[in-house]
Image (tube, rainbow, N blue to C red):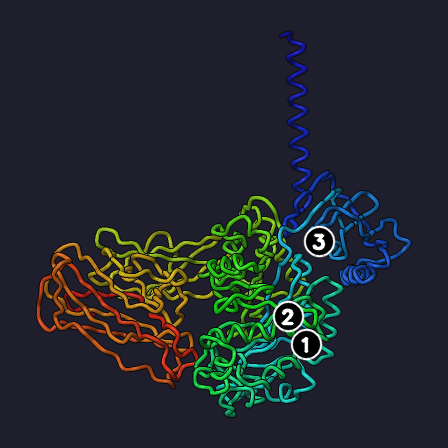
Amino acid sequence: MSLKKTLKIIFLLFVSIYSAEAQVEKLRSVNLGIIPKPQNIVNVGELLSWDPKINVAFEKELSDQGECLIIFLKERGIQVSSKAKKTLFLSKKKINQNNESYEIKINEDSVRIHGNSIAGVSRGIATFQQLLLLNRKDEKISLPVAKIIDEPKFSHRGLLIDCARHYFDKKTILKYIDLLAFYKMNTLHWHLTEDQGWRIEIDKYPKLNSIASSRIEPNGDIYKGIYTKEDIREIVEYALKKNITIIPEIELPGHSQAAIAAYPELSCNKEKIPVANDWGVFKEIYCAGNEDVFMFLEDVFTEVIELFPSKYIHIGGDEVPKIRWENCQKCQKRIHDNGLLDEHQLQNYFIKRIQKFLNSKGREIIGWDEIIEDGEISGALIQSWRGVEHAIKGLEAGNSVIMSPTSHSYLDYDLKSIDLKKIYLFDPIPSESKPRFHDQILGGECNIWTERVPNVKVLDNKVFPRMIGMAEALWSHGMKNFEEFNFRLQPHYEILESLDVNYGESTIPISHNTVFIKNQLFLQLFSKEKNINIKYKKDESGLMNYNHPILIKNNSIIKVQAYKNLKPYGDIIKIPLTLHDGLFKDVEYSCDFNKFYPANKEIALVDGKIGSLDFRDGNWQGFFGEDIEVIIDLGHPSEDFYELVMNCYQYVNSWIFIPKSISVETSMDKKLWVKNNFIKFFPKNNETDRNRRIQEIKINPVKKFKAQYLKIIIENYGKVPHWHEAAGSNSWTFLDEVQVNFNFRK
């Protein structure tokens, strides 16, 4: 090859590299951090400066969307004038078959937003709004030359807000409609009735408005709140302009104590009861044998339908204790007259009857996955919250499904259980489901239940930024990359502040674990976030920087604080730790611990970590409805046992009970077992004892013995007792640590 040709090739290569680098640098100056990530971004060009003045033009059919956009621009100091040099056009245009598809074209003098439908135009507007805020500095407006073609992966993308446990005013609901639209969610699932409050005005039953909407708190304060029909009409109208569907939920047959407090004749025993002022599942439910109940519900739904134009009405159907039905003559007669087998089939009858009425009014029902537990229901949309198996059951029965499992979508759970990354990686299509059913999975929802969400500040803190992760999980196509998503998310925090959102952390600032090295226990601290400095306090020591695992020399409570940008970040974490002779020994289980409460899995009972009053803190291991046998291999024969110490948890509102008994057997070879009089029985749980508590159990041997294996036998409480709201259901057993002490230990 001649020198001339070689030099030419080198020159062309240099030009190519330079051009590529220049293009990359140009793209870095353009913030395309759109969430959810669009399916196609093409023809990205330079960033153009725009005067803070724009003309907005739209088709008559898009007047609502156009007017909302104009308000958005004016609120941010952007003039809207027909004389402006640059124009924003809104129009409908066939793009593909997806109803929410849209296309945006940005050039030097115009922005054109086309949508397959009005909904598609709305989603395009959301993308434009993000681009505007992401690329605006001070009063200067910049927009990149670009073409975006986009559509959602799933048709149902929702957020449930529980306004029954705690009431949130009209302003808050309108704010959340804006936020849903901004991140291209399309459904507000509005939970309006509960044991603790009825929040929707019903003309025909005024006591719902006056009695059921109010409760007396444990401290004597009166808590109340209700949405008038005028409020609801305004909210629904506003949501329609943003193309957000509002699906109301009226709970039945359970979660209905507030309504029964107003109208006791709707219950089986017709006794006067208060609106519930505690959380949990309550046994007072609508009487399935009383025709007046169905008349009441039909009247209520008639007024609900007049307010909400949505295709679906959510009827609940979850967590229905049946003790009242079991002892009700009318309910038993209904079972007999209709050839039903039991109270479970009676619930199926109840749901189908309400479904038939709503179908006659042109509406379809959504119900929690319990509605198919007691018999098939055709034509219903199933909201699966208890796991994949219930979703698959609904799919195989021919139903469409919305996925909102507790494992990924419950925003009331803390960050230890569900953080932003976990939600972002959520796939509504279960890997266990067969491909032929995938079209029946409409999408998903994240749920914010408000038992412990008393105000808007906490609401915002729990919902954001996690809901944004769900928005992308339900919209975007292709492979997921959390690091890339998190990079796009960062400028959105400033946007959230401008939208008056008091967002929380994306993940727990500090995680911890214990390790056992050379017969010594160490505490490890780490953070998933960057630029986090960790400090800790050990016993009475001063605050120290964390640089390496902490040696635990005695039973301790380690206090830990994260710092970000030299400021405290997150809450102070208290980590109780215990030393004992069974640490990190091999443990064998007779049954599986529950997948939702695994704690530290196979070493959870010997990892040195003590549980708190929060049974979801990651240190409590849960077992549902089973007796438990745990065998601890000490590794060698040991003498002179002083005691075994265990903690059990009780919170009867969540069906967690102290075990009936705990006994210990010992063995040298796992064949011959000796009881050694290691046994302890516990009193029956008291109906009035509703507080969370930890029961410490100490078991001391009667005489010395040698043993290599310890078998701890924990007898489950059994069925939930008759006085409980969930009478007859299985109960939970929760354990945190089995402390094996050879000698007396302080």
What separation in Å lies between label 2 and label 3 (alpha carbons)? 22 Å
Quadrant where the C terminus is found in the figure: bottom left
What separation in Å lies between label 2 and label 1 (alpha carbons)? 9 Å
Label located before the other in sequence (2 or 1): 1
Residue 565 appears anywhere in the view: no
Q: Is residue 330 above or below residue 677?
A: below
Secondary structure beneath disc 3?
loop
Left or right? Give the position of 289 relative to 155.
left
Q: Residue furthest right?
A: 83
- Residue visible at 26% across and 54% down in the picture: 516
Q: Residues within 10 Å of mark 3 (few under 14, many from 20)?
A: many
- What residue did someone put label 2 on? 313
Q: Nearer the viewer, mark 2 or mark 3?
A: 2
Query: In which quadrant of the rendered view does residue 510 lie?
Result: bottom left
Q: Is residue 539 above or below residue 276?
A: above
x and y, in percent, of residue 706 in the image: 9, 62
Q: Residues within 10 Å of mark 1 (few under 14, many from 20)?
A: many
- What residue did someone put label 3 on? 100
Secondary structure beneath disc 1?
helix
Label located before the other in sequence (3 or 1): 3
The amino acid type, in three-letter code, at marker 1 is: Val
Q: Is residue 180 above or below residue 262?
A: above
Numbered label attached to residue 304 = 1
